[in-house]
Amino acid sequence: MFFKTTFETVAAILLMMAVGFVTAGFSWYKENNGTQVLSKLVVNIIIPINLFYKVVSAYSTREELFDIIQGLPVPFLSIGLMFLIAYALYKLFRVDEKRRGVFLNVAAMSNTVLVGITVIEPLLGPESAPYSLLYYTANTIFFWTLGTFLIRRDAGDQAKIFSLSNLKKVLAPPFISFLLGSLFVLLEIPLFPVFEDVISRFSDSATPVSMLLIGAIIRSVPLRSYRFGKDMIIGLVSRFLISPLLMAGICLLLPIPVLMKQTFFLMSCMPVMTQCGIMSREYKADYAYASTMVAATTALCMLLIPVYMLLLQYVNIFG
């Protein structure tokens, strides 16, 4: 039953990505800047609504919110340590200096929204949503401060980590909706039935629409870009082996709920953030490497999810 559920979930996700991949090749899609429009729709409307609904439906009381939020230091610790490990790998294997910041983001940052939350909830159940949101919070704060700072340094920009422009990016629509949802829980503000029905319907569309976008992004990367050189291999090993091993080690040492450990573990081995490619292009860093890693890790992640689930369900690494 476990394998059936896991493979059905992964197969469904791959099929949705395939639809996005094929659709992105149609002339009408290209002529209307389909990927750009779809990206704006997902990031500014679908995902914010989805996150708001996840928060208000995941936390029934403010006490429950305060209780679960105590696990927030765990992803902060894991991501912070992963940046340090990635820097050591950068030095040890002499990763191209022009892509240092991008490489550090590849190794340490996970795609928590487009892939993470949408994939993990069907696998671990809706009870995992609060823990996914904790990881999302830490991941978002790290990316829009240290992450973008490092990418800008690749392009020769001497920006500060806590620059005003970066801090504004932290307060992007997804994070604002997350905070708004938390406020609704803290103040115990009820949702009108009609309003709840509308946002739940939008929330249900998050997975298919996000997978359409991911499929389109994968298609946008030319096949000639997939050169499995040293920097790409080190990035893949960091994302799918070292990062989950680090998170597993931290979780084994802490007395936190098993479901929280499982959720954090899966979040730590999600693919590279789509924003890593977007910001690399915006700041004129190594966009080719970033976009290739986004596409490669997203495709590879779908193949590795059954392996990670096997470790959680049968090897039972967290007891």
Image: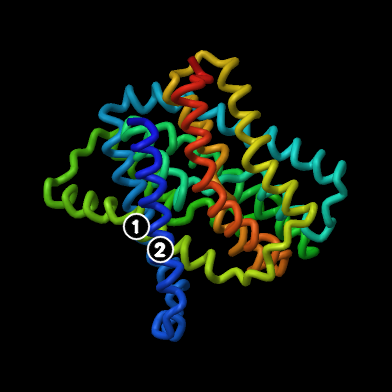
**Placement of 275 over or under 255, stated as above or below:** below
Mark 2 secondary-structure assignment: helix
Q: What residue appears at the point 68 percent right and 63 percent down from the top-left corner?
A: 226
Q: Is residue 140 visible?
A: no
Q: Where's residue 199, x and y in %?
A: 24, 52
**Placement of 279 over or under 299, stated as above or below:** below
* Location of the N terminus (image quadrant): top left
Q: Number of labelled discs?
A: 2
Looking at this view, is 302 or 217 the one in front? 302
Kindly identify the amino acid type of the residue bearing the numbered disc 1: Pro
Relative side of 30 to 251, left or right? left
Image marks 1 and 2: residues in contact by CB distance under 8 Å: yes
Q: Residues within 10 Å of mark 2 (few under 14, many from 20)?
A: many
Q: What residue appears at the point 44 percent right and 27 percent down from the top-left corner?
A: 69
Kindly identify the amino acid type of the residue bearing the numbered disc 2: Leu
Q: Where's residue 139, x and y in %?
A: 55, 42
Which residue in the structure is indicated by mark 1? Answer: 208
Which residue in the structure is indicated by mark 2? Answer: 212
Q: What residue appears at the point 54 percent right and 54 percent down from the top-left corner?
A: 299
Q: Could you tell me how far apart the alpha carbons at marks 1 and 2 are, in whole angstroms? A: 6 Å
**Placement of 212 over or under 109, stated as above or below:** below
